[in-house]
Amino acid sequence: ADEPVQQPQASLVSSGETVAMDWQGVPGRTYFMEWSLDLVNWQPAPFLGFGDGAQSFTMETAEPRAFFRIRFRDDPDVDSLEEAAAADFDGDNLSNGFEAYGGLNANSSSSVPGESDATGDADKDGAKNTTEQQAHTNPMVRDHPLLLLEVSKVEAGGF
């Protein structure tokens, strides 16, 4: 079997509350970012990248100290960022793009301990993550459509 291509080193720059990481991408490689406050508990960061050329990740954080790491996956069936976003690397019926930008881990079918990503409800708004994906809502924000209904007072005799 072919050995995976070595990942070039990344550069990290911190300025105030902004952290920026830059690196050269490798053809055919899908990139994810994670961050941690303690190097033990890692959280997905809102990023999905693909392929060769310059890659860049920027995140705002008020934390005095935070750690960042690049995760990647080589998949010969994925040829573009669009295909990487639509794919489901962890097999939980949620797209990589939805998970990456929705605060879930696209490389694990259980981002929240004890819950399946697909059937879980991380924001506790009553909508499973699969429903959130179909509705194009954020699985980490209580934005279920039924919670967003407005109630208006109707005057007597009027509609």
Image (cartoon, rainbow, N blue to C red):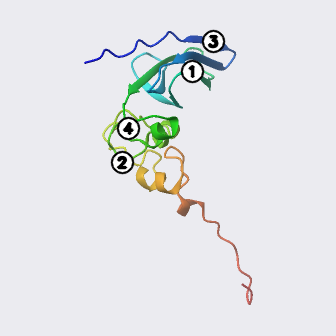
The amino acid pointed to by label 1 is Gly
Location of mark 4 (residue) = 112
Location of mark 1 (residue) = 53
Nearer to us in this view, 132 or 7: 7
Other residues around mark 2 within 10 Å, as few (<14) / some (14–19) / many (≥20): some
Relative height, residue 1 to residue 106 (above, below): above
Quadrant (top left/top right/bottom left/bottom right) for the N terminus: top left
Could you say whether the residue bearing mark 4 is in a helix, strand or loop? Answer: loop
| Of marks 1 and 2, the one in the foreground | 1
Which is more N-terminal, label 3 or label 4? 3
Q: In the image, is 104 to the left or to the right of 58?
A: left
Could you say whether the residue bearing mark 3 is in a helix, strand or loop? Answer: strand
Location of mark 2 (residue) = 93
Residue contact at pointers 1 and 4, CB within 8 angstroms: no
| Of marks 1 and 4, the one in the foreground | 1
As measured in the structure, the alpha-carbon distance from the residue carrying label 2 to the one carrying label 3 is: 35 Å
Quadrant (top left/top right/bottom left/bottom right) for the C terminus: bottom right
